[in-house]
Amino acid sequence: MHGMAIRVNRNAVDKIVFYFNTFAKLMTGLFIYLFKLICSIPIPTWDTLWVWDLRTFRPYSIKIEHNAIDAMQFRKISPLPMTAPIVDHLSAGLSVLDEGYRNTAVVKSQMTHIDGNKGTLAYRSYPVGYLFENHDYEEVSHLLIFGTLPGSEQKRQFRARIAREMVPDPSVLRAVHAFDPAAPAFLIISAGLAAWAASDPTKIPVHAGDRIYLGKMDAVDAGIYRSLAALATVTAMTSCHQQKKAFVAQSDANLSLIDNMLLMMHHTDRFGNVDKKFSNAINKLWILFADHEMTNSTAAYLHAASSLSDPVSSMVTGVSACAGPLHAGAVDLAYKRFSEIHATEGGVKKHIEDVKAKKFRLMGVGHRVYRTVDPRVDYLREMMSKFEKEVNGNPLLEVAKEIENAVFGDEYFISRKLSINADLYGSFVYAAL
C-alpha cells in the first residue's frame, strides 16, 4: 500500500493567520477602549450634570453646586482623540456663549441673597426688613464689607476713619466747578471721583507699583474707607454746585458718613446741626439700596478692578454704568415722562391706554428680578407717608401716585405681575426731601 501525501496550501494558511491576528488586535483595542471608557465614568451622584458628546461618544460629568456649574469644566469636552495631550484638549474644548451675560454667574458671594420668586432680600443672612427697622446705614455698611454688625467701639472707629478721609484736594472742587450746573449729576460725580483719584498718585498701582494692594489687607481697608469718603464728599460737592450753594469741606469724626455729607450739603436746622429728618430718611433709604447682588454697575466696577485698578478709579466705571437708562438712569427718564404726562391732555388715563396699546413703555413699573413683590416697597411707601405734605405738593409725584393707583387696580398689570418698582419709590422720597 502506497503512502498518501498531504499537501498544505501555505498561502491560504498565512492569510487565515493574518486575518485572525488582525481581528484579535481590533477586538483587543476595542476592549481596551471600552474598558478605559467604563473606568472613566465616575460613580453617579444626584448633584451631577451628565454630558454625552456624540462626536466622540465620550461621557463627561460636571458637578452641580448651588444650582450652578463651573463653566471651565466644558473645556475638557474636546473632539480630539483620547491620546492627545491635555493642553491640546483644553485649547480645543467647548466654550460657553452667553451674549449679554444673561445666564452667567461670575463670583461666589455671601453678601446678599435675593429670591425673586418669593420676594425676599437679605444681607449676610439678615432680612432687609430687620436691618431697616433695627440698624442704621453705618452698621449695615460694616456688615456688608466686613461680615459683622459692629459693636460700639468698632462703629466709632469705622466712622472716624471715614471722616478723616472726607477732606478733598482743591483740584477735586475745581473739576466739579468746571461743569455747567445743569449737566447730568452722574457725569459731574464721575469727573470728581477721577480728580480725587488723581490727587494722590501714591494710591494708583500704575504709578506706585502693581502690588500696592495685592495681599495687603491694611491697604485694601484704607482703599475702602477712601472710596466711601470720596463718593459721599463728591456727591455733596455736586449737589451744592447744581443748587448753586457754596461747598465747605467739613467732617466730624463723631458724626456718621451721612451726617457729614448732609452738613456739607447745608441740610441743617436753625442751630447748625444736621437735620434729623433728612438724616433718618437717607439712612433708611441707603439701607434698602445698600446692595443688590451683581447689578450692572457692580459688574462694571469689578471689571475695572480686575485689571488691578485702584478702588476710586474703579468706582468711576461703576458710576458711569449706573447712569444708563437701563440702570439708575431709568429714574431720570421716568421723571421726564411724568413731566410730559402732566403737560398732556388726558393725563395718566390717556398714557395708560397708550401703554396697553404698546405705544409706550411704562417707566418705573416692573423689575427684572422680583416676580411677585419687591420686599423694599412696603418700607418705601411707609417713608412716603411721612412726607405726605411734600409729596402732595409735587405735581410730578402726584402723576406718579395716579400711575401707582392705576397699576394696582388694573387687571392688565395685575395679570402680568407688574407693580411700581422700588427704585421709583425711592426717587419719590428723594424728591420729597
Image: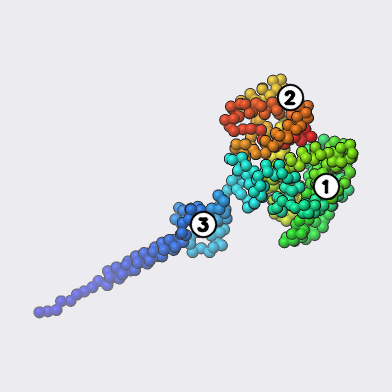
Q: Position of residue 413 (x, y in %)?
A: 60, 29
115 to the left or right of 30: right
Q: Is residue 419 above or below residue 257?
A: above
Q: Which mark is residue 13?
A: none
Q: Nearer the viewer, mark 1 or mark 3?
A: 1
Q: Position of residue 51 (x, y in %)?
A: 48, 53
Q: Is residue 360 above or below residue 29?
A: above
Q: Residues within 10 Å of mark 3 (few under 14, many from 20)?
A: many
Q: Are marks 2 and 1 in contact (CB under 8 Å)?
A: no
Q: Which mark is residue 78?
A: 3
Q: Position of residue 215 (x, y in %)?
A: 72, 61
> In terms of sequence position, does the residue under pointer 1 or pointer 3 come before the other?
3
382 to the left or right of 33: right
What residue did someone put label 2 on? 342
184 to the left or right of 101: right
Q: Residue furthest left?
A: 1
Name which residue type carries label 2: His
Q: Secondary structure at mark 3?
A: loop
Q: Quadrant of the N terminus?
A: bottom left
Give the residue displayed 52% in from the left and 55% down from the top: 62
